[in-house]
Structures are given as structure tokens and as C-alpha cells.
Image: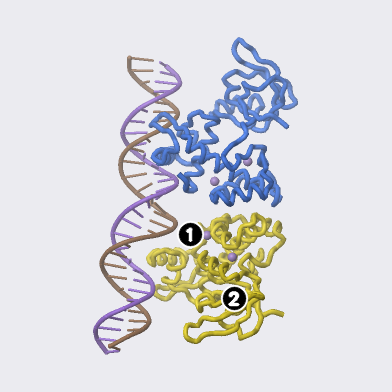
Chain colours: A blue, B yellow, C purple, D brown
Amino acid sequence: MLNFSVSEENYIKAIFRLQHGDNTVTTNELSAELRAKPASITDMMKKLRTKKLVHYEAYKGFRLTAEGRKAGLMIIRRHRLWEFFLSEKLKFTWDEVHELAEELEHVSSKKLIDKLDEFLGFPRYDPHGDPIPDANGKIEASRQVALTALPLNKSATVCHVSDQSSSMLELLGHKKIAIGTRVELKKQFDFDGSMDVRVGRQQTVNISKQLAQNIYVKYDG
Amino acid sequence: MLNFSVSEENYIKAIFRLQHGDNTVTTNELSAELRAKPASITDMMKKLRTKKLVHYEAYKGFRLTAEGRKAGLMIIRRHRLWEFFLSEKLKFTWDEVHELAEELEHVSSKKLIDKLDEFLGFPRYDPHGDPIPDANGKIEASRQVALTALPLNKSATVCHVSDQSSSMLELLGHKKIAIGTRVELKKQFDFDGSMDVRVGRQQTVNISKQLAQNIYVKYDG
DNA sequence: ATAAATATTTAGGTTTACCTAAATTAAATT
DNA sequence: AATTTAATTTAGGTAAACCTAAATATTTAT
Ligand SMILES: [Mn+2]
Ligand SMILES: [Mn+2]
Ligand SMILES: [Mn+2]
Ligand SMILES: [Mn+2]
């Protein structure tokens, strides 16, 4: 249960992220995320399955088991605590910390991380605003929601798109929406689920239900 | 010149330590140090030779090249800065820090380590009393003397222990000896090389030759 | 100087985590 | 429903870093 290789940890963390709760993740999605070939993903999924860290059946995608999720939360805890340390104590800028934390997160002593947590004053958010799981793996419900679930007139920032096909990206580009874009839901139409959204400081654009379901945002502030 | 694997780094650091200046190191010595079989050492020496990090000819032992030595100093710098951090900031005891630093030392960003150095206030010695190389790899020449070479009744201060196994540190702890402890050699026994040593202001304790060889002191005053 | 003991290297595995190319299954188009 | 396209898996390889067992070189003892 306890000791994973660096690769296994990177896979677990990536699956955790791509699951967004508990959607099933596909071979190609994980392949893109980790820049490894699909064949390598299949290899690793078989290994993680025998270790009971993922549910996996050929051709049907995968999802972390309860144990896999627990492991994922601990890796994320380490990652975010190191990011906080690098930013707060060593004065790295927010865009430099991720890459370094990507390595530090694999030093897996529980005692080290709990003492680091204490030293840092039990911070609740990393420098990117993501919540840090506590020593038991408890994590604040993410403020990340699909655009379809955003309340009216509440400002939020696009933080993720779950479909990365070129047709999706073309459409997003056409509507001038990218990661980091400020958005605000102005009106929602019952008939087809489409919505009018204010993009940045510009005029509103209409967005289909299908598109909105694939855009994830974080509340501002 | 720039990027080494975790294994390569552990080999380089171990050779550096065993060289003690620039003695040549043997396959068996390194094998014992790294707990790897002699055949594995030979494999790695061939690899490090092609990378021009060691001078090596079959059956004749090996020694770091100038470049290998430079790499070694940087790894030792990282190791000792992390040890200082763990001890000073996270309040680990001095016998716990080595093992953790053994992992942290392989996160090899130069910028990270230089910022860590600054954050720590440019410490000159690690928790075991070993000098920390500066950002250019310059390291204080240590002119300490082993406890076995200390004259009778001359007060000195423990500044270094060359074996940092937990069994060694446990024994030192039991005898109430630590870095900074004042000691004075009271008697030396020819039969087994053991010695009676006054520790601090307390009564004398008996120390085996094997232990005394690993304790280094600096004369007081 | 020979023989025995010891140290080191070579030869030929194993495991992990990747890869490419080909085969198979599933999804989308016609 | 048949065909084409896309996704995924299988088969077979590679490189790093280990290993064991056997061969060879060096050192020590007789
Ligand atoms: Mn990582
Ligand atoms: Mn982050
Ligand atoms: Mn190490
Ligand atoms: Mn040390």
C-alpha cells in the first residue's frame, strides 16, 4: 500500500486530476497529459490494476480505487505544500514553483511532510489557489465547477477544458476564451441549455450547452 | 556535464567521500559503501568513465576527474543544505536528517539550492559539523583531528563524525556526545585501543577504538 | 616462484518504464 | 449495415541499473 515509484506517483496524480471528481479517464487523455505513448499508458494501467489502485477494463477507461484516490491526495498534498514553501519562503514566482514541486513531491516521508506543514503554519491553499489536503487527506471541495453550474453574475476564471480536440479549441479561440479568461454568466436559456456569457471586459457571446459542459471555472476572490 | 541520474549522483558522492582528498578508490570499497555488488560498480565506472567523470583503468581503482569532483561538491552542497534546513527549520534531530537529505539532494535545480542557501542565511556547517560548499563549490579545508590523535588532557570540541549511520549516532547519543560537546582524553589503553574520555563536565566514559576513529575534534581556544 | 586467497571483470540474466509497429476493438460516417 | 476512422491493446524492443555465476587478474602466503 505504501511505496510507489516516481512514475506510478505521476500516473496516479494525473489520473486524479483528469477524473475531476470521478469521471472515467481515457488512455489518450492520460497519454496527452503525461506525454507518454498510449501503449505505455496501457502497460501502466495493468500494473496499477494489479496493485488495486485503479479500476480498469480493456477499452473502457479507468478510475482510481478508494486506495488510489487516497494515494493521489497524499501526492497532491506534498506537491502543494512544497509549492507553498517555494513561493512563501524561497520567494519563487508562482509560475516557477510547479516544475520544482513536480520533483519534490516524490520525497515521500510522511513525517517530513507533516513537519513541513507545521513549519509553514498549516496553509490551506497553494500559490495557485488550489486547496491543500490535510494530514488525513481531507481536502476542501474544489471551487472548480463546470460553466453550466456557475450562478448568474458571479465572476469566475476559466481554469480547465475537459475536451481538447482541435474543433473544441477552434471554437474557444473564435469566442476568445482561453485558460485564465475572466467570465461571467449573464443568461441561461431553458430551451437548449445555451447561455450568454460575458468574456473578459467585452460583449457577451452565446455558448452551447455542449461547450459549456467542457469549460471549468474557479470563482474569483 | 549537467544532468546526472540519481544513481550516478549517489556514485559520484560516494567516490568523493571515499577519496578523502585524492586517494584512489577500489571496487570493493565502493561496493560496501553503496551496498551494491562489485559487478554493478564496474558497470557504473565504465559509464562514468565515458562521461569523463572518473579516471578508471581495469583493476586499478578510480578517482574523480576535475569535473567529477565539481559535480560531487554540488551534490554535497545540496545534501548538507537540506540537512541544515531539516534540522534548523523543521526541528528534525540530527540522526534523522541524513536519510531524508539523501533523497532531497537529487532535486538538482541550481536556483532552488541557491535560494535555499540564502533563506537559511548561508550556513557554513551542516548539523554534523561538516562544512557546506558555497555556490561556486568552494569548501573550507578541514584541519580537524581524530579523537585517537588527541593528546592527553587537552580540551577539544567535537566537530565532525565521519560515520553517520544511525547505529553510530545512537551510540554517540547514549554516551552524550554530539557536535559541539567538549571532550578531554584522560587515558588510552594499549590492549584494545579503547580510551577514557571526559565528556563535558561529567564523569569519563569509555570509548572503543572503532568509535574514536570516527569522531573528529578541534582544539579549543 | 608457486599456490592459494582475494579482488575485479565479463557474460548473461531481471525489472522498470519507456518505445514502434501491427493487430484489434469501438465509434463515426456514409 | 457497411465502411472508414479513431482509439486502444498486443507484440516485441531498448536502456538503465541492478543481479548471479563464471572467468580472469592481482595480491598474499608458503
Ligand atoms: Mn512529479
Ligand atoms: Mn499548484
Ligand atoms: Mn542520495
Ligand atoms: Mn551531514
Residue plotted at (41% across, 71% down): B28
Q: Sequence order check: which comes first, mark 2 or mark 1?
A: 1
- Residue A61 visible? The answer is yes
Question: Residue A208, image x and y in percent?
Answer: 60, 18
* Residue type, mark 2 in image: Tyr
**Helix, strand or loop at disc 2?**
strand
Q: Residues within 10 Å of mark 2 (few under 14, many from 20)?
A: many
**Helix, strand or loop at disc 1?**
helix
- Residue B130 visible? The answer is no
Query: Which residue bears the numbered disc 1?
Result: B7
Q: In the image, are marks 2 and 1 on the same chain?
A: yes
Question: Residue A142, image x and y in percent?
Answer: 62, 32
Instruction: Measure the C-alpha gap from mark 2 to mark 1.
Output: 29 Å
Residue plotted at (64% across, 25% down): A174
Question: Residue A197, image x and y in percent?
Answer: 68, 20
The chain carrying label 2 is B
User: Which residue is more in the foreground, B78 or A158?
Assistant: B78
Which quadrant does the C terminus of chain B fall into?
bottom right
Query: Which residue bears the numbered disc 2?
Result: B216
Q: Is residue A3 above or below residue A65?
A: below
Question: Residue A85, image x and y in percent?
Answer: 66, 48
The chain carrying label 1 is B
Cβ of mark 1 under 8 Å from ligand 3: the answer is no
Q: Residues within 10 Å of mark 1 (few under 14, many from 20)?
A: few
Residue plotted at (63% across, 65% down): B126
Q: Nearer the viewer, mark 2 or mark 1?
A: 2
* Residue type, mark 1 in image: Ser
Classify residue A112 as left or right of residue B124. Answer: left
